[in-house]
Image (tube, rainbow, N blue to C red):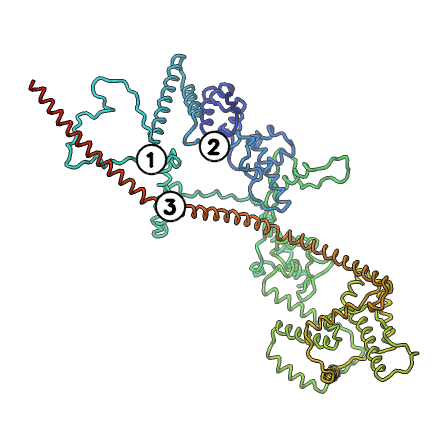
Amino acid sequence: MPRIMIKGGVWRNTEDEILKAAVMKYGKNQWSRIASLLHRKSAKQCKARWYEWLDPSIKKTEWSREEEEKLLHLAKLMPTQWRTIAPIIGRTAAQCLEHYEYLLDKAAQRENEEEVGDDPRKLKPGEIDPNPETKPARPDPVDMDEDELEMLSEARARLANTQGKKAKRKAREKQLEEARRLAALQKRRELRAAGIHVQKKRKKKRGVDYNAEIPFEKKPAAGFYDTSMEQYDAQEPNFKRLRQQHLDGELRSEREERDRKKDKQKIKKKKESDLPSAILQTSGVAEFTKKRSKLVLPAPQISDAELEEVVKMGVASEVARQAAEESEGGNSASSTLLSEYSVTNNMNTGLRTPRTPAAQDRILQEAQNLMALTNIDTPLKGGLNTPLHESDFSGVTPQRQQVQTPNTVLSTPFRTPGPGQASDGMTPLAGGMTPRGTPGLTPGRTPLRDKLNINTEDQLTDPAYAKHVQKESLQQLRQALMSLPVPKNDFEIVLPENAEKELEETEMESGFVEDSADIEALKQAQRDAERDKELKLRHTSVQRNLPRPTEVNESVLRPASMEPLTDLQVAEELIKQEMITMLHHDCLHHPSSNAVTQLQRGKTKGPTSTSNNASHISYLETHPYKPISTEEMEQAKAILTTEMDVVKAGMGHGDLSMEAYTQVWEECYGQVLYLAGQNRYTRANLASKKDRIESLEKKLEVNRGHMTAEARRAAKLEKKLKILLGGFQSRALGLLKQHNELWEQVEQAATELQTFNQLKQQEDLAIPRRQAALREDVDRQMEREKELQQRYGELLMERESLLSGTQKF
């Protein structure tokens, strides 16, 4: 099946040169004839390549700001009409479309506050360029294909033919013959480099063949020693590492590039050691000479007529000031409003140079407008129009933005202050006080004349003016204090008796200023000590944060209608009473964490928290809680310890081990049974079978609830750990797989090592036997050769005798 070639693809340098030469010969109308010279390109592609890239009139420099503004302006006027826009800008349609998309992408990245990186339209590895006609040509490879060489030779022959048919045919045949000879020569070179020598068939010539023989050659005489063994075979070339550059040698361009780098290094070293001579050496070289850019200044904003007007205004202000002084006899208000500005030159030193107004990025604004118009919804929905930046459509090209420098010369006294510069209706007071300015000035603009205090105080950095402002503020404060009303009541302040001692102590301590961090640490330590002290006054269950009941069971007390109690029973009742009081106090003031959690989640059963608090408060009112001091608690603990020792000695109790204690605790705990129906605990031997079953069911339900909650918690933790450790787990699996592969390789290598060791042992045992067998064979062969030599000698003697006998006859 013949190979099918699809025309197109990236243009190469040879194809561009052939296309330019063909256009020079055939013109810009015979694209089919031109395409016949290029086997891989069609007529349409050749035409597009010429008009999009190779035409000398195409402008390939970087886009200027004026061209970008003009492109966006015309794209808004004539959307998608790139063939019409291109000649106005002076670029091709493909260039206009590509740069327009680039500006839109740049504006989108600026709006999304993304990092401006590489061009997103740049082709990724493996992608095919849809418009190869608008891209630079790819350089030619060092070793071209046979098709490309044939196309190049054919094009050279056809383009060089400017004569008749016979001359064309002769020139074409000559070119083809030369190409054939060069191809055969290249083939022989490659074969010779590969170690394959091919003898060229030559016709026999009369006389000496100077290509094969050396005329008048005199071979040297044979020496005393044999040199036949000194000839070594050439080493076989490594074809895998052999490249075309190894055969062609160093190119001229590479040699020039290396020399150029050496020159740069020499000049760099000379600059470090001897700078003046290096400057003199590189002054005339075009590569090291930097061209000065042209100085571009903005157009003047103030004409000569305006300057003359400013001078006239200054003279008029001076005349008005003199007239006011002569007519009013030096009125303070007039002198303040019409001050002599020629004297106040010291104000100029503290003022900052007015800045130029911030320029707007017209290109970015136009790109954002085009993006907004592209993504607009249908007008059938109604609503407001899409907000756009202001733009000028007075012409085809956008209007240039004139950058103006703030004019500080026109700030004359005859000009009326604008809004925000002075308060309405305020006249300067006598004594030099002027009304304060209000915010409203243009940021960064500082007028030179500020006798009316138009500027804010933070804009002036003159120390003399700051001192003047401070003096004015003190004077205003004195006047405000003098205008205070007379006091109606009299007060007397009596100092405490030890005020003088405390004052002296503070004066003595005032010499050392303690660090704020040390003060804060001391306060924190005091707060911790107070918290610990308060915690020690609480009950032991609260200190240890043990679980406590939310409802107090008062049925443990004996009813009052019982018969008289003994002293031991009375003591027991007093202990129970104190216990119940403590429980009520703790439930009210120090509720347990589980009770707080249940109240927050709304899972409490029975009375609400308000009723519980009310019951605790009512009980504590009838049975008040009396706090116990630390000393009393220590005494009670000492008494209990003494009594415990007496009881232990009297009852003969020894030290109880942890195993025994645990066993007794489990037995006691096993006798306790919770009755769900009655909501209370009882002994297991006193409960019925039904109560036991209900208790076990309740226990199973609680355990299932705990199991469900723990399962949910475990699932959440598992999910979180999977997110946190997912990468590590995948990496661990990969490393485990690698470890297994390495272990298998180690096992295989160990097996091979053991196998080769056994082979070595066997070979060590077999080598002596083989050597002995070979020696026997050699000895046998030598003996046989001796016998044969003797036989040969005898036969020679017999032959000679026979020959001599025949000669006699």
Q: CA distance from mark 2 to mark 3?
A: 64 Å
Vertical side of 732 occupied by 562: above or below: below
Question: Callout 3 environment at 10 Å: few (<14), some (14 to 19), or many (20+)?
Answer: few
User: As rendered, which of 494 and 622 lies closer to the eye?
Assistant: 622
- Locate residue 769 relative to residue 609 in the image: left or right: left
Tag 1: amino acid? Glu
Residue drawn at point x = 38 percent, y = 14 percent: 167
Tag 2: amino acid? Arg
Residue that carries the numbered disc 1 in the rendered image: 236
Residue that carries the numbered disc 2 in the rendered image: 138
Whichever of callouts 2 and 3 sits on the residue coming sooner in the sequence is: 2
Q: Quadrant of residue 641?
A: bottom right
Residue drawn at point x = 62 percent, y = 81 percent: 509
Vertical side of 677 occupied by 380: above or below: above
Residue drawn at point x = 53 percent, y = 48 percent: 740
Q: Which mark is residue 762?
A: 3
Tag 3: amino acid? Gln
